[in-house]
Amino acid sequence: MRLEDEARHKSEDVDNAVLADVVLALQRRIEVNHDFDIPYLAGYSEDGRTVYIDRHLPRSMASQGRAVRLAPFLLTHEVVEKSLLDKLRLHYLHAHQIALRTERDAVRAAGVSWQAYQP
């Protein structure tokens, strides 16, 4: 898929549809593995090409009468965090904060309450 085709929605402002496009683009690039016990629910491979999600974590949650998959949000967090650590050499605390806020905004953009999403 061409990069231009992935950016289906256009906006220079903070926009839920654009963030949804980002989450989909990340899912196309990264493999998700649910086969292992993972501390803190999710993590990433050394090369960043695989995100591991704890095998005991449910694959979805109910929100407003619909099933919402959790993997896209966790994957978004892990990819952002890993990128900031590896490419910009940010301190883990800073990378984690930015990743957490990105995850939170992706959850909200999907129409899910952040409070309901939290374990």
Image (cartoon, grey):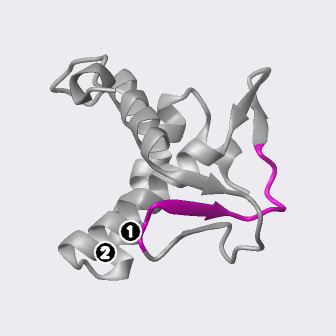
Quadrant of residue 110 within the rendered picture: top right
Give neighbour class at mark 1: few <14, some 14-19, many 20+ (Cα, 10 Å): many
Count every numbered label the image shows and give the total.
2
Q: CA distance from mark 2 to mark 1?
A: 5 Å
Image quadrant containing the N terminus: top left
Q: Which residue is mark 2?
A: 85
Looking at the rendered structure, the kind of residue marked 2 is Leu
Q: Main secondary structure of the magenta part?
A: loop
Quadrant of residue 3 within the rendered picture: top left
| Image side of residue 108 versus residue 91, left or right | right
Give neighbour class at mark 2: few <14, some 14-19, many 20+ (Cα, 10 Å): some
Looking at the image, residue 25 lies above or below residue 1: below
Task: Using the image, tell me which numbered label, if any, was put on residue 111.
Answer: none
CB within 8 Å, label 2 to label 1 = yes
Q: Which residues are magenta?
A: 47-59
Q: Nearer the viewer, residue 68 or 44?
A: 44
Picture residue at 29% right of the left edge, 17% below the top? 9
Instruction: Provide the secondary structure element on which disc 1 rests.
Output: helix
